Image (cartoon, rainbow, N blue to C red):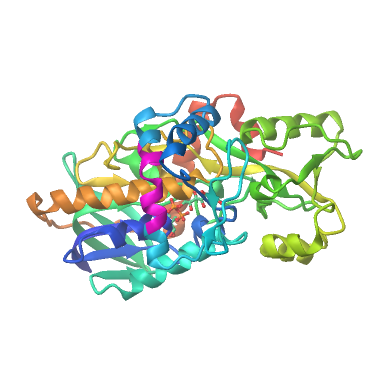
Amino acid sequence: MENIVDVLIVGSGVSGLYCALNLDEKLNVLVVSKSNLKNTNTYLAQGGISTARNNNDIELFIEDTLKAGQHKNKIDSVSILANESIENIDELIKLGVDFDKENDSILYTKEGAHSINRIVHTKDNTGESVARTLINRVLERKNITVYEDTFLADIIKDKNSCIGAILIKDNEQINVFAKSIVLATGGIGGLFNNSTNQEILNGDGLAIAIKNNVKLKDINYIQIHPTAFYEEGKSGKRLLISEAVRGEGAKLLDINGNRFVDELLPRDIVSKTILKKMKEDKSLYVYLDVTFMEDEFIQNRFPSIYKECLKRGTDITKEYIKVSPAQHYFMGGIEVDLNSKTSMDNLYAVGETSCTGVHGANRLASNSLLEGLVFSKRCAKHINSNIESININTREIININKSVKEITKENQEIVIKAIRKECGDNYDELLNCR
Ligand SMILES: Cc1cc2nc3c(=O)[nH]c(=O)nc-3n(C[C@H](O)[C@H](O)[C@H](O)COP(=O)(O)OP(=O)(O)OC[C@H]3O[C@@H](n4cnc5c(N)ncnc54)[C@H](O)[C@@H]3O)c2cc1C
């Protein structure tokens, strides 16, 4: 089967959908996702989205982002992130996202390494509220077609230009030719024994980039979140206990009930301190304590975390939460410029699969959804301005004769090999990370 569109977007998380919504409505756009539209890390996001509070906060927001990123960030990208944050949060509100408010004013919360409260949120399920809104808006758009359960097997290239992609849907190969192709394929948590991510996300976009000589950047920068819910013998996808819980005052305690770290230090430092403490105490977890907060506050502010912990046998209003670190986020990825363009012509990458350089070596809490918004909009604008000069080239494509399962396995091996090469001895520690 063959299909011709103006723009193909692979991925239905915040970056793929927001990119689609910012494309010119006269363009014919196809959005695909390998599972259903909601099976994304975006849907899981809890804490919120960072934003400069106002123009006076931009410098401090930049400073906090650079400090958390160990100054390995790309300064131009960080400056764009902070300067374009307010307009994108306003756009989300216009699209219908209902952030928490008090007396009609947005409520801002705090997370680790932010100097002030600057995180907008909808209780503790910000991702779900953003995802639902974007999905609804995309489904309303006449120029956007959506294919769920459709797997990107490879891109189609002509010298150093991307001209389309090979998709597999219901075991059938679909060759799509497009003027611009956007990879919004998310993170790599599916490759780890312990991760907060959706298990389906195993770096397909990265594997495709590697196979087609598209440049990557900083793939050794992998973030370990300090507080995933500990369940005995459980591996794979783990429940995150959002940093916003510490932002609201939760305390980290060792197994003897003693505080051992400033809970609001950057994530990498808190994770390392917890892992060290666990080793010293020969324990598989530490505790997160919210029992001193009002029950009503906990249930209203963190309804999902409260319910999910209760399902797992912990009433967080009365008991300490057992937590340990888990893989959470990928700062590296497919190298892109300030318009999200990769090293291959007509190929863009946005969101967690891309590396804009904003996060440096360690992402500041709640900067990921913001990066997805800011840089996918820039991507859409770049496509809008350049697409007219691009011609669609079609050609005959041979059948790849591989199943989704085979390609997934191949992709996993390619990405693990690349990361292992960059991470050296740290790799095995990262893989297990608790
Ligand atoms: C538990 C949790 C909590 C988080 N909380 C926050 C938070 O509060 N604030 C914040 O800023 N960030 C948070 N993050 C990080 C943030 O949610 C993600 O980094 C961000 O949502 C990634 O968006 P994305 O658009 O890049 O990818 P995703 O939302 O992960 O979407 C990836 C898409 O790619 C598709 N895909 C992948 N491979 C293929 C393929 N081969 N073929 C077809 N489709 C494919 C998938 O089907 C999916 O649609 C959290 C992450 C987790 C896991």
Residue sitting at the far front? 103
Q: Is residue 73 above or below residue 198?
A: above
Q: Is residue 7 above or below residue 205?
A: below
Q: Residue 120: image x %, image y %?
A: 53, 53
Q: Residue 166: image x %, image y %?
A: 28, 57
- Horizontal side of residue 106 vs 160, given as left or right: right
Residue at 74% across, 53% down: 234
Image quarter where the C terminus lies is top right
Residue sitting at the far right? 256
Q: Is residue 344 magenta?
A: no
Q: Quadrant of residue 209?
A: top left
- Horizontal side of residue 346 vs 365, given as left or right: left
Q: Residue 97: image x %, image y %?
A: 46, 65
Q: Could one spot residue 402 in this view of the protein?
A: no
Part of the protein shown in magenta: 80-90
Image quarter where the N terminus lies is bottom left
Principal SS element in the magenta part? Answer: helix
Residue at 56% across, 62% down: 101
Q: Nearer the viewer, residue 239 or 77?
A: 77
Residue at 43% across, 58% down: 13
Q: Residue 238: image x %, image y %?
A: 67, 53
Q: Nearer the viewer, residue 196 or 192?
A: 196
Q: Quadrant of residue 275?
A: top right
Q: Is residue 314 above or below residue 410?
A: below
- Horizontal side of residue 92 vs 383, given as left or right: right
Q: Disc count in the image?
A: 0
Residue at 54% across, 43% down: 329
Q: Could one spot residue 154 in this view of the protein?
A: yes
